[in-house]
Amino acid sequence: MSDSNAAWFERAQAVIPGGVDSPVRSFSSVGGTPYTVVRGRGAYVEDVEGTTYIDYVQSYGASLLGHAHPEVVETLRAAVGDGTTFGAPTPGEVLLAEMIVGRVAGLEQVRFVSSGTEAVMSAVRLARGATGRDKIVKFDGCYHGHSDALLVAGGSGVAQLGLPGSAGVTSGAVSDTIVARYNHVPVLDDQVAAVLVEPVAANMNLVAPAAGFLQGLRDECDRVGALLIFDEVITGFRLAPGGAEQYFGVTPDLWCFGKVIGGGLPIGAFGGSKKILSSLAPLGPVYQAGTLSGNPLATAAGTRVLGLVNGDQYDILASRVATFANELQAAIRSSGLYARCPVEGPLMGLYLSRDEFETPTNFREAKILCDNGLYAAFFHAMLDRGVALAPGAYEILFVSFAHSVEDLATTVHRAAESAEVAATS
């Protein structure tokens, strides 16, 4: 069997359901065969056929510094020689926790887990345990991992596959989950334990919070004694050195982190005040555990990544992304399609249409654009020209610190050609 993407995908389908270990990696919503990556360097990935792509997936935001950053690689080489997991406390988890707590105003303690899903699931359990209430409010089109209670009306792969939730999730599992419209502050009652929100919705393409939305959630939670949870698995340490709290000036009660804090390795974390986290075992009655939590390789990589970036660099990246978004939007429009590339800090979306449109403010508006069929043709035209976007219109573009001005200019040029192909498809 040859070293081709098709051959590897055929082998994968024989032993892995759908040939992928996460549905968002599948090409089901865009058609065709996924490329199989063998290595990455900076802003680039290379597949089994030797094709190199400018990569805007970047492990869906985990690779803040780009792939295989030399200092992160050296940190991991040193760490792995000391052992990969112990099931016991390590200095590394303390060092990373100190760094995270030191950067985020209002955050006093964190507990590490192994994924973003686990972080959010644990934060929700903690919120219920700390308040003695059952109801959770989430927002239509926001994705908070694949735990049962939070899959309902989710974005990302759930939306791409056209699913309202998931088979196997019982009605009882979601009976205490209330779904509200993003950018609309719901009226709460004293049965609500917490409001869970992406500070910037980045799983329905990109929808920014309207002015006053996050503060409105803070005020409404305070009014009824509910907790406000920020799911910062994507925004954490990507929007700003202190995440969404610093960027928007709104302080939640609980935070959930992932992606960036692992430096490319699997990790997650949730945290809040010492008072709230004292409800966690072994101090309190809310049980949460994980053998691989605080993994020494992941904490070493995460500490190195966070130590390599500062506020000035975030400002430079945000400025670069803003310019890129404007140029990309103009290039696509010049080739026969309408485009909008909303930006929030270094985060960037991409909506396509044959007609002029307004930037979406909620999932219903985003869904109309994401489901209009144009993205698949544009995606493949870009892939044919060596630019890798996420294989689904509900995802965003991740520009890392490794993407050069030249990389972005090349992408704009290739986008103009791709838009022309998509416009005539």
Image (spheres, helix red, strand yellow):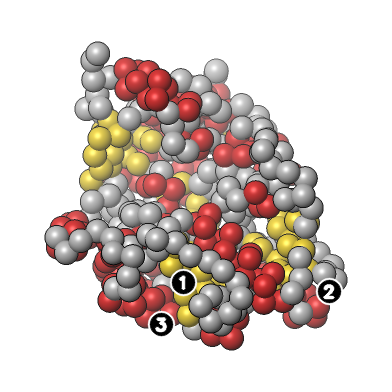
- Kind of residue indicated by mark 3: Gly
Residue toward you, 140 or 362 = 140
Q: Is residue 15 visible to the viewer in this orientation of the structure?
A: yes
Q: Position of residue 232 (x, y in %)?
A: 53, 63
- Looking at the image, which residue is at 37% across and 80% down? 98
Looking at the image, residue 128 lies above or below residue 381? below
Q: Which mark is residue 102?
A: 3
Hey, which quadrant is residue 164 in on the image? top right
Give whichever of discs 3 and 1 has the lower sequence position. Answer: 3
* Residue 5, image x, y percentages: 32, 22
Answer left or right for 210 relative to 70.
right
Categorize mark 2 by other alpha carbons within 10 Å: few (<14), some (14-19), many (20+): some
Which SS class for mark 1?
strand
According to the picture, the residue beneath numbered tag 1 turns out to be 111
Number of the front mark, 3 or 2? 2
* Residue 208 position (above or below residue 211): above
Q: Is residue 44 above or below residue 66?
A: above
Local SS, label 3: helix
Report the quarter where the N terminus lies.
top left
* Mark in front: 3 vs 1: 1
Q: Which residue position is annotated with label 2?
A: 190
The residue that appears at 56% across and 28% down in the rendered structure is 29
The image quadrant where one finds the C terminus is top right
